[in-house]
Image (cartoon, helix red, strand yellow):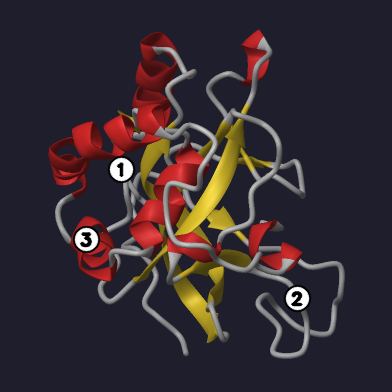
Amino acid sequence: MTLPLPPRSPSSAGAPDVGTVPDVPDAVLGWRTWRIGRRAQRRAELIAPLAGSAWPARRPLVASCGSRDHTPPGERCGCGLYAVADPGVLEWGPSDHEVLGAVALWGQVVEGTRGWRASHGYPRFLVTAPVIPAEQRAVLSRRYGVPVVRSEVPARHLARLLGGEPTLTERLLRGPADDVEAVLGARMPEWAHRARACPTAPTGPRRRAALPWWRRR
């Protein structure tokens, strides 16, 4: 399917005028992960965990592909920007600097069994692990123009918890991005207490691992 692109600004040399988050009617909203850097020069960058490429700030990421036979996302290719419908199936690496986030996808969109691949994308909000300091969250928020919220439990545990609560997950995706902190904050004391009481036990329902391609872009 093809979704509309953001409006263009006449003063931006043809570049999409996204402001903070693109106002794209009927954009697909899904979940994905990013990694944020530890080194000073990358502390304000969102990095695709496997590809290692940085998502641009204040403008959409446009998917690319090594093949010249099609434009991303190809129907028979793995190219495109990825997101899943259920955060509980996301695959996580060992780093505690991976963050959970919602992403808006638009343009050319291909639907799969667990989510979507798209030609254009931009973050909608981010949720970080407790180890990410407030200063770094503030810098990320200013740079990308989206809310960056602190979780009291590791981001991967939060994803599993949200995977077991589809109503809450839908509310986070569909509601105003500025309400994410309040919505999560209402449940965070309960989740943090459970994590402290049983730190080695899973904090959410068991899920089989997602295929690696969910995290490429």
Residue nearest the viewer, comparing 114 with 79: 114
Mark 2 or mark 3, which is nearer to you?
A: 3
Tell me how far mark 2 sits from mark 3, CA to CA: 30 Å
To which residue does mark 1 refer?
19
Q: Secondary structure at mark 3?
A: helix
Residue at far front of view: 197
Q: Is residue 47 above or below residue 107?
A: above
Assess disc 1: are there few (<14), some (14-19) or many (≥20) residues with their C-alpha within 10 Å of its C-alpha.
Answer: few
Q: Secondary structure at mark 1?
A: loop
To which residue does mark 3 refer?
168
Tell whether 78 sits left or right of 175: right
Q: Amino acid at mark 3?
A: Leu
Assess disc 2: are there few (<14), some (14-19) or many (≥20) residues with their C-alpha within 10 Å of its C-alpha.
Answer: some
The residue depicted at 35 percent of the width and 56 percent of the height is 162
Choose top left, top right, bottom left or bottom right for residue 104: bottom left
Assess disc 3: are there few (<14), some (14-19) or many (≥20) residues with their C-alpha within 10 Å of its C-alpha.
Answer: some
Q: Amino acid at mark 1?
A: Gly
To which residue does mark 2 refer?
78
Residues at circles 2 and 3 in contact by the CB criterion of under 8 Å: no
**Residue 207: horizontal and vertical position, in percent?**
55, 66
Choose top left, top right, bottom left or bottom right for residue 65: bottom right
Tell whether 16 sits left or right of 187: right
